[in-house]
Image (tube, rainbow, N blue to C red):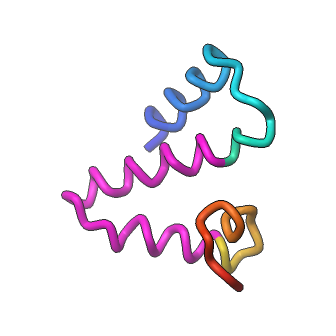
Amino acid sequence: MAPSVHRALQAIVTHQIPADQIDCAILAAINVTLCLLSNGDDRVAEGFNRDTAISGGRAPHIWGFRT
């Protein structure tokens, strides 16, 4: 997973992503990686999103989950 997050960080720097979108870019990279590593099982990424939302991260407003 680290290579995907590293690529996301490189894209953030290269494309000068605004600060308020950095969380989204990193979470998207993690979600894509989880989906690919699980052979396309989107439930894995959904579980990650739900866990992030429950833990009080910024994901609830990014992904639409309510805690």
Q: Residue at x 70, y 19 (%)?
A: 16
Q: How far from the left and from the top, in percent, is residue 50?
A: 56, 76
Q: Is residue 16 left or right of residue 35?
A: right
Q: Residue at x 62, y 71 (%)?
A: 64
Q: How far from the left and from the top, in percent, is residue 65?
A: 62, 77
Quarter of the image for the N terminus: give it: top left
Q: Is residue 59 left or right of residue 51?
A: right
29 above or below 8?
below
The single residue placed furthest to the top in the displayed view is 14
Of residues 5 and 12, which is closer to you in this image? 12
The single residue placed furthest to the bottom in the displayed view is 67
Q: Which residues are magenta?
A: 24-52
The single residue placed furthest to the left in the displayed view is 39
**Snapshot quadrant of residue 9:** top right
Q: Residue at x 42, y 65 (%)?
A: 45
**Snapshot quadrant of residue 13:** top right
Quarter of the image for the C terminus: give it: bottom right
- How many labels, in total? 0
Q: Please tell me whether residue 10 belongs to the stretch shown in magenta.
A: no
**Snapshot quadrant of residue 14:** top right
Q: Residue at x 68, y 71 (%)?
A: 60
Q: Please tell me whether residue 48 belongs to the stretch shown in magenta.
A: yes
14 above or below 32?
above
Q: How far from the left and from the top, in percent, is residue 58?
A: 74, 62
Of residues 49 and 65, which is closer to you in this image? 65
